């Protein structure tokens, strides 16, 4: 069983509920787990993509998820968002076990997601693409919509208000009516981000948001992720190979290798963890660290 990078005798065995205390106005507040990954495992034929992975994401936290190619990061996202059903373990979100909930209900629970490969409707405009993300969260049914009841109107107004806010925040207002296919890659990524956020998720899963961006675009993205977290009071689980970004904005980092957790702790502790160094740089680096 790999040791957590931040383990001390005092912390050992404690989950994030016990570990993450913060202080405001002289009082201590305890952050509760929004997402609990419990002993999750899944295999594809002979490939063990995840094996006994457990960790928690607390409310309001940015949790980085790192690991070399093929270590199971996207597979875990697919398990959380219901695309795959884990063969072992449980995933509990906001007190509900996602593994026992019908897949079509998962999106409405408050989990937003961006994809490793952009998944946009290329001929639709920026605004139309973003508004697609608002429909999951509509509470009104077919009859209310057919009758154009006032609450349908209120929902539409609410979606429009959030659209305007996101267009401004993500600097997309000037291209709101453009088909997304006409935009540079970095802007398309921001459209996907806005689509994931417009429905007001409690948890946002971001799969390699910095992939394909240059250095200055990554800097902008780092600030943006923090701003979005604060403005919309979300938790974020961030998969990224761009180490500077992960280490800069994560409150905590979890590292995977070959489908298993090899380290968990503060960004600095995980960055210096011998297992993480070995996983990324190979056996010689490990020997040097030892
Ligand atoms: N649908 C599938 N069928 C077969 N194998 C799969 C499937 N999905 C994932 N895998 C395998 O599971 C392992 C983990 O893949 P995954 O895509 O989760 O890795 P990753 O950590 O996201 O990698 P990367 O950093 O390259 O995106 C890999 O060996 C991959 O080939
Ligand atoms: Mg991946």
Image (cartoon, rainbow, N blue to C red):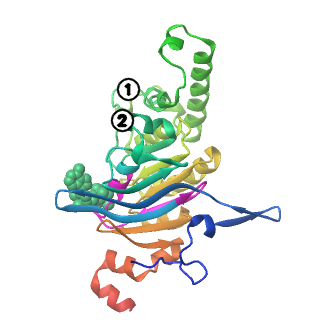
How many residues crowd mark 2 within 10 Å: few (<14), some (14–19), many (20+)? many
- Asked if the magenta segment contains residue 38, the reply would be no
Which numbered disc covers residue 175? none
Which numbered disc covers residue 120? 2
Residue drawn at x 38%, y 38% is 103
Q: How many marks?
A: 2
Q: Position of residue 105 (x, y in %)?
A: 43, 35
Question: In the rendered structure, are the residues bearing label 2 and label 1 in contact, judged by CB atoms less than 8 Å apart?
Answer: yes
Instruction: Return the residue at label 1.
Output: 124
How many residues crowd mark 1 within 10 Å: few (<14), some (14–19), many (20+)? some
Residue drawn at x 37%, y 80% is 275
**Start and end of the magenta stretch?**
57-77
Q: Name the foreground residue: 99 vs 258.
A: 99
Q: Position of residue 86 (x, y in %)?
A: 33, 53
Q: Name the foreground residue: 86 vs 177.
A: 86
Up the image or down, 151 lies above or below 105; here it is above
At mark 1, the secondary structure is loop
């Amino acid at each position: 069983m790999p040791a957590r990078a931040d383990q001390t005798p005092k912390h050992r065995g404690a989950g994030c509920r016990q570990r993450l205390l913060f202080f405001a106005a002289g009082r201590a507040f305890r952050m509760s787990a929004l997402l609990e990954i419990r002993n999750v495992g899944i295999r594809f034929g002979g490939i063990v993509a995840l094996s006994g992975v457990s960790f928690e994401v607390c409310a309001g936290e940015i949790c980085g998820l790192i690991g070399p190619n093929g270590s199971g990061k996207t597979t875990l996202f697919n398990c959380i968002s219901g695309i795959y059903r884990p063969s072992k373990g449980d995933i509990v979100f906001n007190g509900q076990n996602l593994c026992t909930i019908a897949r079509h209900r998962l999106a409405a629970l408050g989990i937003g997601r961006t994809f490793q490969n952009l998944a946009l409707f290329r001929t639709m405009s920026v605004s139309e693409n973003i508004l697609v993300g608002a429909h999951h969260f509509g509470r009104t049914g077919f009859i209310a919509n057919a009758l154009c009841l006032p609450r349908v109107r209120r929902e539409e107004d609410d979606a429009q208000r959030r659209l305007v806010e996101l267009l401004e925040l993500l600097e997309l207002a000037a291209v709101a009516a453009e088909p997304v296919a006409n935009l540079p890659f970095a802007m398309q990524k921001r459209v996907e981000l806005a689509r994931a956020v417009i429905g007001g998720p409690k948890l946002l899963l971001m799969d390699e948001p910095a992939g394909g961006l240059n250095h200055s675009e990554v800097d902008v993205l780092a600030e943006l992720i923090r701003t979005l977290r604060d403005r919309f009071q979300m938790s974020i689980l961030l998969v990224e190979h761009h180490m500077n970004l992960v280490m800069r904005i994560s409150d905590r980092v979890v590292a995977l290798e070959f489908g298993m957790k090899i380290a968990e702790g503060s960004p600095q502790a995980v960055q210096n963890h011998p297992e993480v160094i070995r996983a990324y740089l190979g056996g010689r680096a490990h020997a040097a660290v030892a």
